[in-house]
Image: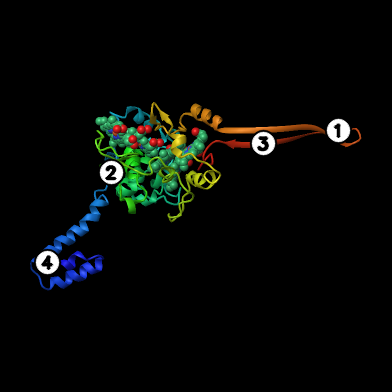
Amino acid sequence: MKRLMSFRGEQGLFAAFHDIKEKGGAMRTILLLLITAFVMMPLSNAQAQKAKTIDELAKQFDSSQCKSCHAEIYAQWEMSHHARPLMGVKGGLMLTPLAMKGTSPFSPDDPKKATIKTFPCFKCHLPQAVSSAEDSVAVELAEALLAKDSAKIAKLQITCIVCHNEKAIVHKLTEGFPEKGVIYGSKNIDNHPGGKIKKSVIMKEAPFCGQCHGLGPNFEFDNPVQCANLYGSYEHAYIPAGGTQTCQQCHMQKVNGKADHLISPNFNDEQKTSEQLSKAINLDVQTLGYEWLRKAKDYRPLIVVNTKISHTAGHRIPDG
Ligand code: HEC
Ligand code: HEC
Ligand code: HEC
Ligand code: HEC
Ligand code: HEC
């Protein structure tokens, strides 16, 4: 048994298994049990039960139970782009080309052949599909896109649990993977009525948002995709130029004492968006009009226009 405890790699494990198998008996049973435990552990960690349908995936990450106590935050979130990440601006169902033959490099010949990989957009628009869904969810989505079944597609959201669990830990090798059933926030709360809250060190920091708001092209795909990249601009332009604010400080300013989960802009609200943009963007125009005396009695009207456009955002705008 002493030797068993010191096993590390698979090779050692199976070499020893072979060794003892020759002798048979109780030792073998104990060893088999140990091996079973060894193999089962990583499986249960990796959420062995993957969702097979859109409804199952939506249910696994359903956050409607948060609504009763966090009504205001819930209402803000429901209006936000995070609550409709596959719907497109004004319901444009922007993933449709990925379901139609020949309209994107990822499109399958037949929606039945869609897989999680043929929707590289899931990395940021629906990260729980990558970790927790079977390919059958991609098939169902491709069929729903072709049928313009908005009601079905709307069920797939970046819910409270996606941000407060799935995306709450970035240094997983040192801090461990997010635990099932735990909510992560900016402090520990053991007696949180909605379930235990553990502290996430990144919740209030820019890298939390940077996980989905992009550094640049995503070269890991067979066909690189570049969608959102303003976290790159934040890291490489805003911070080096002396910027000090986090994404949360600008985008989640407190409303009634709590971080605003609308996380504006909301592009479906044109009036509010243009109000915010006109506050954020400055256009400075200096002009000089004069007459140029080219030769005697020949006055030519000329103008010099100097324009300078600046803005207060912590990154390039517009993005994408
Ligand atoms: C039964 C009521 C109740 C439910 C349900 C509930 N919460 Fe809470 N939650 C609270 C109360 C009360 C506090 C304030 C506790 C405190 O700050 O000490 C709180 C605080 C929090 C915090 C703040 C922690 C921090 O960083 O300061 C987070 C995050 C949170 N809840 C998330 C959630 C999420 C996500 C859900 C749904 C999965 C949820 N809550 C469901 C009552 C509830
Ligand atoms: C690196 C993460 C990431 C990947 C990968 C990604 N997106 Fe995005 N996408 C975002 C974020 C974040 C936004 C919103 C913020 C922005 O535009 O800066 C966005 C916005 C959009 C928008 C504009 C808003 C809207 O709803 O109409 C479209 C269209 C879009 N993405 C389509 C796609 C498609 C299609 C794919 C896959 C081929 C994809 N994205 C892959 C992160 C990503
Ligand atoms: C799980 C991935 C994810 C995380 C984490 C995330 N976002 Fe997003 N965010 C998105 C996607 C995807 C969209 C675009 C949805 C759509 O297509 O309309 C978006 C939209 C937005 C928008 C609306 C404007 C737009 O272009 O659609 C803002 C603002 C925004 N996010 C800011 C933030 C901030 C600030 C944080 C961190 C506190 C954050 N996001 C965290 C994925 C994420
Ligand atoms: C110094 C304040 C500030 C910081 C820091 C900041 N933003 Fe912004 N952000 C703005 C302003 C201002 C706008 C443009 C006005 C508007 O539409 O609300 C904007 C616009 C956006 C948009 C819409 C982009 C578009 O195409 O129009 C997204 C998405 C966004 N920010 C996400 C983030 C994320 C993610 C971070 C952190 C990596 C971040 N912001 C950091 C102030 C900031
Ligand atoms: C896009 C990611 C994202 C989503 C989705 C999200 N949250 Fe948060 N939440 C955050 C971040 C980041 C903070 C920390 C903000 C800060 O303190 O500046 C936060 C903070 C909170 C807090 C503490 C607020 C405070 O100021 O004390 C509560 C409570 C909370 N979230 C509940 C929820 C609930 C409930 C939902 C679903 C309706 C939800 N969150 C959805 C990212 C998210």
Residue to which mark 3 is pinned: 307
- In three-dimensional space, the C-alpha distance between marks 3 and 1, rounded to whole angstroms, equals 26 Å
Tell me the mark number nearer the camera, choosing from 1 and 4: 4
Q: Secondary structure at mark 2?
A: loop
Q: CA distance from mark 1 to mark 4?
A: 105 Å
**What type is the residue that disc 3 sits on?**
Thr
Tell me if I can see residue 64 in this picture. Answer: no
Residue found at x 67% / y 36%: 307
Which residue, given by chain and number where applicable, does mark 1 sit on?
Answer: 299
Residue highlighted by disc 2: 53
Q: Residues within 10 Å of mark 3 (few under 14, many from 20)?
A: few
Q: Is residue 221 left or right of residue 293?
A: left
* Contact between labelled residues 4 and 1, with CB atoms less than 8 Å apart: no
Which quarter of the figure is the N terminus placed in? bottom left
Residue 219 vs residue 56, the one in the foreground: 219
Q: Is residue 34 above or below residue 316?
A: below
For residue 28, the mark is 4
Q: Residue furthest left?
A: 25
Asked where in the image residue 303 lies, by quadrant, the reply is top right
**Which of disc 1 and disc 3 is earlier in sequence?**
1
Q: Earlier in the sequence, mark 4 or mark 3?
A: 4
Q: Which badge, 2 or 1, is on the more N-terminal residue? A: 2
Distance from label 3 to label 2 (Cα)?
54 Å
Q: Amino acid at mark 4?
A: Arg
Task: Indicate the quadrant of ligand 3 in the picture.
Answer: top left
Q: Which residue is at the front of the view, 191 or 310? A: 191
Real-space Cα distance between discs 4 and 3? 81 Å
Is 173 above or below relative to 281? below
Residue sitting at x 42%, y 48%? 101
Marks 2 and 4 sit apart, C-alpha to C-alpha, by 41 Å
